[in-house]
Image (cartoon, helix red, strand yellow):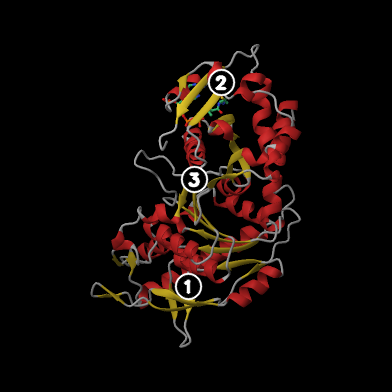
Amino acid sequence: MSNSNNQSFIDCFRNAAPYIHAHHGRTFVLQIGGDVVASEKFTHLIHDLALLNSLAVKLVIVFGARPQIDALLKERNVTPQYNGALRVTDEISMSSVKQAVGDVKFQIEALLSMGLPNSPMAESAIKVASGNYVTGRPYGVVNGVDLELTGKVRSVEKETIKARLDAGEIVLIPPMGYSATGEIFNLSSIQVASQVAVELSADKLIMINSDSVIKNDKGETIRQLTCEQAMSQIDPKNKNQIDETPSTALALGIKACESGVKRIHYIDQNIDGGVLQELFTRDGVGTLLSGAPFDTIHQATFSDIGGILELIEPLEEEGVLVKRSRETIETDIKDYIVLVRDGSVIACAALHHYPEDNVMELACMAVHPDYQNDGKGDMLYKFIESIAIENKATILFVLTTQTEHWFIERGFSETKIESLPVQKQDIYNFQRNSKTLMKKLAAN
Ligand SMILES: CC(C)(COP(=O)(O)OP(=O)(O)OC[C@H]1O[C@@H](n2cnc3c(N)ncnc32)[C@H](O)[C@@H]1OP(=O)(O)O)[C@@H](O)C(=O)NCCC(=O)NCCS
């Protein structure tokens, strides 16, 4: 390995370390669509899941088999019957469902059992548990069509699943449900996964499908959504439908989130290593659905000081920001506001009060380079301005060497040093020669 490769490996590993720690002992439920199983990247995915198991993540895998079932029906000259996106499972197609689901189950078990030297699974000795963990009931008649042996989840054997997970096993659940009268129902893997996640109070529900990532009108992946925002993306007609469509995946994700599953991740099956990137990097690659906003702005506490220093030190080196010692920040910590993503400070600013003049100073404003030009600065500024107004400040000022226009575009204008509070004038650094900008605050 070259030195630069070594360094990038070390950086990656260090950046992943907090996530390795955070995921230890957590319960994740993964839903894998049948088309993922059929793809060439499936083996890599299963190896990545084995890696999660070795990092003490408690894993439940729920798989689908829709394309495999359709292929088998075709082979047997049976035309698949659908009512909208829902399969009609009659007795004849049920034998194909059982066979296709069984085949996929064996395939996953075989991949998880691979212990060949030189493979990523060497020495891993993974145990897989599977059984009658899900009870089903008939879906019933929809728009006048009886869906026969297509079903819905009735209950989940959560204690049995938990016991298997506690024993270090991976739990593998097919999209099938059994009934007390001995019937077998064909279920939606998305519904099974979300219900299992809710019953287990899982930390994460992860869905990996071809169309599962949520996109905006421009076709770009939406990286984070709150449940409230996600609601507007669902066609109300599909809200209570349980099939294998992206709309159902989103609706069931919202329900799971509202029922206590902390985070729902939607990952594109075409991204090799997508699960690892989603779980071990700050920004991930898919869409994250959560109850609370992913980025939060709040008053800084002592635990944010390390993050603030890490953010501003490079800008101090460049001379964009004035140098501040850790002690100065500690003393003024109540003045600092931070924008935090997943525990990391990605933007900060300080708001210093000059009460005798009803004036406040905005200082030390910085957005991490990876997140610039995405409205974060604006969001932080609006928050700061609202606090200044709440504190009855009439004037907000800022000293800047390289960001004059950014502030002018937000209503600031240049002023003389003499207009600053006297305390500030006394410490003005003429060598630095910063521009002095002021803004009269709206509510005053
Ligand atoms: C200035 C800063 C806080 C803006 O944050 P941000 O999240 O990138 O800004 P937003 O996404 O809200 O705004 C982006 C807009 O500001 C513009 N912009 C960014 N930096 C600018 C600068 N130094 N001067 C003028 N405009 C700037 C961008 O071009 C973009 O304009 P556009 O939308 O017309 O293309 C951020 O760039 C930063 O941290 N810079 C380094 C530190 C710094 O200069 N701090 C100010 C100390 S007084």
Q: For the residues marked 2 and 1, what is the alpha-carbon distance in whole angstroms?
A: 64 Å
- Of labels 2 and 1, earlier in sequence is 1
* Three-letter residue code for mark 2: Thr
Where is mark 1, residue-wise? 176
Q: The residue tagged with tag 2: helix, strand or loop?
A: strand
- Judged by depth in the image, the label closer to the viewer, 2 or 3, is 2
Q: Position of residue 172 (x, y in %)?
A: 58, 67
User: In the picture, which quadrant includes the N terminus?
Assistant: top right
- Of labels 2 and 3, earlier in sequence is 3
Where is mark 3, residue-wise? 270
> Which corner quadrant of the image does residue 427 belong to?
top right
Q: The residue tagged with tag 3: helix, strand or loop?
A: loop
Q: Position of residue 216 (x, y in %)?
A: 38, 43
* Three-letter residue code for mark 1: Met
Residue at 66%, 68% (x, y): give it: 165
Comparing 236 with 12, the one in front is: 236
Where is mark 2, residue-wise? 400
Q: Is 156 located above or below residue 284 in the figure? A: below
User: How many numbered tags mark residues here?
Assistant: 3
Residue at 60%, 13% (x, y): give it: 433
Q: Is 238 located above or below residue 294 in the figure? A: below
- Judged by depth in the image, the label closer to the viewer, 2 or 1, is 2
Q: For the residues marked 2 and 3, what is the alpha-carbon distance in whole angstroms?
A: 45 Å
Q: Position of residue 353 (x, y in %)?
A: 59, 35
Q: The residue tagged with tag 1: helix, strand or loop?
A: strand
Comparing 228 with 256, the one in front is: 228
Q: In the figure, is residue 189 to the left or right of 51?
A: left
Within 10 Å of disc 2 (Cα), the crowding (few <14, some 14-19, many 20+) is: many
Q: For the residues marked 1 and 3, what is the alpha-carbon distance in whole angstroms?
A: 26 Å
Residue 369 appears in view: no
